[in-house]
Amino acid sequence: PAGATPAGGSAGVAPHLVQRDGRHALMVDGAPFLILGAQVHNSSNYPQALDKVWPAVKDIQANTLEVPISWEQVEPVEGRFDFSFVDTLVREARQNKVRLVLLWFGTWKNTSPQYTPAWVKLDNRRFPRMVDQQGKNSYCLSPFGEHTLAADKKAFVAFMSHLKKIDEQQRTVIMVQVQNEVGTFGLVRDFGPKAQAAFEREVPAAVLARKKPPVPGAASGAWRVVYGDYADEYFHAWAIASYIEQIARAGRAVYDLPMVVNNALRDPLEPIAPWKSNFASGGPTYDVIDIYKAAAPSIDIVGPDIYHPESAKVSAHLGQFQRPDNALFVPELGNAAPYARYVYQILGRGAIGVAPFGIDYFDYANFPLGAKSSDKAMVEPFARIYAAFAPMQRQWARWAFEGRTYGVAKGDDLRDQTVAMKGWKAQVSFDQWMFGEREWPGNAKEQPPHAKQPNGGVAIAQIADDEFVLVGQFARVRLDDAEGSGRAQLVSAEQGRFDERGRWVMERRWNGDQVDWGLNFTGNPVVLKVKMGRY
Ligand code: N0T
């Protein structure tokens, strides 16, 4: 908590990532920071538009806002830069007491060049598109376009220099995303002459050292020789990652902020197979994170954009992107109500943060990926959870970094889940009345109104050997010792919150009916501090 003003203000200490024992923290003002984020819709990046952004940010109670900065907007005429929107955004973010993650929409935004300036879009000679085996242009700009890379890099460096000038003292901007959901739809890689020549050269040693072929290939050689049927996709990933690396490295050389890329995910459960055009080839999908790590060391994090509502897929995505060499950060999460429960799972797993996508009050909704409307009802399920985490956000980030946190979300199968902790376990169950057992005659006959809804979630921090902080909704938690000795005793359960100085403030003790049937969380998330013992 010390020195951690919400909108910045601690001069000198640059935000940065730290790693210890395979866990990660985003350090902001010198201490672990939890991104309770929100991302605006794609076209809300203009000064006037922010009037429809801030009310939604306030309602959702985010501490960090993700906003695109587009190449076409900052360099409409080649060589003439206009950062007035960046100025307005940073100023208003400070007034609204939120931090910023800025998204550089340049050469690729969801793979397309739609956010490049017109002088790039319309000059295929200078800024070449990828070509297929027949020499036909793809819509997608080639990662082998030297002039494209030079021009994007120049604009990005100008942007980062400007940020340094206006924000180095305050650090309102805590992270930068380079491009958005890169890759190519409909074409596995570039077949242009430059690309083809590179494809026929040896796989770089840095890639070989990290990326093993899924089916045994040669230990070294050209891409096809080493990676067989996977060679085209892997090569494209390497080409795009190398391009991004040059941009990110040049940007960090002028102003060193953490940098991330995001991914439009491939199916996490489908057996891994050579590319068959059901995802963007060359994007940082889970199977090529190693190639991105090898080719783009200036990128700290590859983050999953989660738009699969199924609980099994969400769990798989989180497992694939949370790695000792890759902090878990969810830059986008669908903003429909069923996604809200995953915030418990994500933050409980020790993510540095999460951001539902499409948080503003413009009359646009990205259903079926997200909610059907952009209004108060859309932000509300997230707001309740953020409100519960907000007072303890700094503690939570520290506990996560120390490996003390756990999280679950109700599965689509509605089944109980067990959380194994140090010396203790928690059994989490759903769809029950607050009183009594599930199978009681009255209870069995009538289900509570929240039953069978995708809504339950719990996050737990084991803050000492026998002490826990729990936050949750629509769930019942029973704590027991790991061995199930039959001697576990609930010593106390306090409902309350942490104050600005990090001290626990008790509101009331739960006892009697409120603990006899487990700890029952309802639709209003609350925070409990629980002590356990043994008799
Ligand atoms: C996201 C957003 C925005 C299961 C979609 C998701 C954002 C971009 N793209 O509203 O465009 O800028 O990063 C693509 C999801 C593909 C469909 C997945 C089906």
Image (cartoon, rainbow, N blue to C red):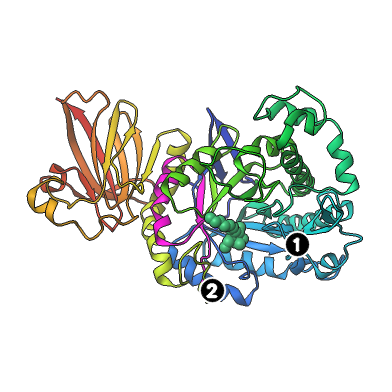
Across and down, in percent, residue 361 comes to 50, 73
Q: Position of residue 78 (x, y in %)?
A: 87, 66
Mark sitting on residue 364: 2
Label 1 CB-ligand 1 distance < 8 A: no
Asked if residue 370 lies left or right of residue 227, the reply is left
Viewed as shown, does residue 75 lie left or right of 331?
Answer: right
Label 2, residues with CA under 10 Å away: few <14, some 14-19, many ≥20: few
Quadrant in the picture for the C terminus: top left
Residue at image position (39%, 65%) is 380
| Percent x, y of residue 290 | 66, 34
The quadrant in which residue 16 appears is top right
Residue stretch in magenta: 333-360
5 or 187, which lies in front?
A: 187
Q: How many marks?
A: 2
Task: In the rendered structure, find residue 113 and report the number of the disc placed on it.
Answer: 1
Residue 351 belongs to magenta span = yes
Q: Quadrant of ligand 1?
A: bottom right
Question: What amino acid type should be assigned to the residue bearing mark 2?
Answer: Tyr
Question: CB atoms at circles 1 and 2 under 8 Å apart?
Answer: no
What's the CA distance linking mark 1 and mark 2? 22 Å
Q: Where is residue 275 in the image (x, y as percent from the top left)?
A: 67, 44
**Can residue 386 be spotted in the picture?**
no
Give the numbered dot on residue 502: none
Of label 1 and label 2, which has the lower sequence position? 1
- Identify whether 117 is placed above or below 482: below
Compared across the picture, whether 361 is left or right of 74 comes to left
Query: Could you tell me which secondary element the residue under label 2 belongs to?
Result: loop
